[in-house]
Image (spheres, grey):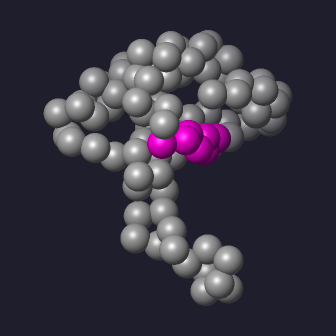
Amino acid sequence: MPLEGLREAAQLPGTPVVFVNIHPREITRLDQLIENLQKAAKIRRRGDLVLEIHEMAVGPVNEFRPFREALTDLGMYLAFDDFGAGRGRGRGDR
């Protein structure tokens, strides 16, 4: 997870909400992803951080639970990206 965008967002005025997309493969390396999120939490000074998960990254609920708990512990939020609408890209129907 690149952290440069979070460093830039930390310089914005107010309390920005920052949305970060992650690649579906990052979920398969959960320990590494959580470690990166811990680094991100230290960079974020204010405002919310929302991690966007692509529909292809969601697996069985029991495997996903530790990730969700880590986000909660870090004060981060989760958003699901492209659920059911991902095929519409590039066709002008958005």
Q: How many marks?
A: 0
Horizontal and vertical percent position of residue 91: 65, 84
Q: Residue at x 73, y 37 (%)?
A: 14
47 or 34, nearer to the observer: 34
Q: Is residue 21 magenta?
A: yes
Above or below, 78 against 2 in this view is below
Overall secondary structure of the magenta section:
strand
Q: Residue at x 81, y 30 (%)?
A: 8
Horizontal and vertical percent position of residue 92: 67, 85
Residue 10 found in image quarter: top right
The quadrant of the rendering that contains the C terminus is bottom right
81 or 23, nearer to the observer: 23
The quadrant of the rendering that contains the N terminus is top right
Question: The magenta stretch spans which residues?
Answer: 18-24
Residue 71 visible within the image: no
Residue 55 found in image quarter: bottom left
Residue at the extreme left of the image, as rendered: 62
Residue 55 visible within the image: yes
- Side of 63 where 45 appears, left or right: right
Residue 60 found in image quarter: top left
- Side of 50 where 5 appears, left or right: right
Horizontal and vertical percent position of residue 49: 56, 35
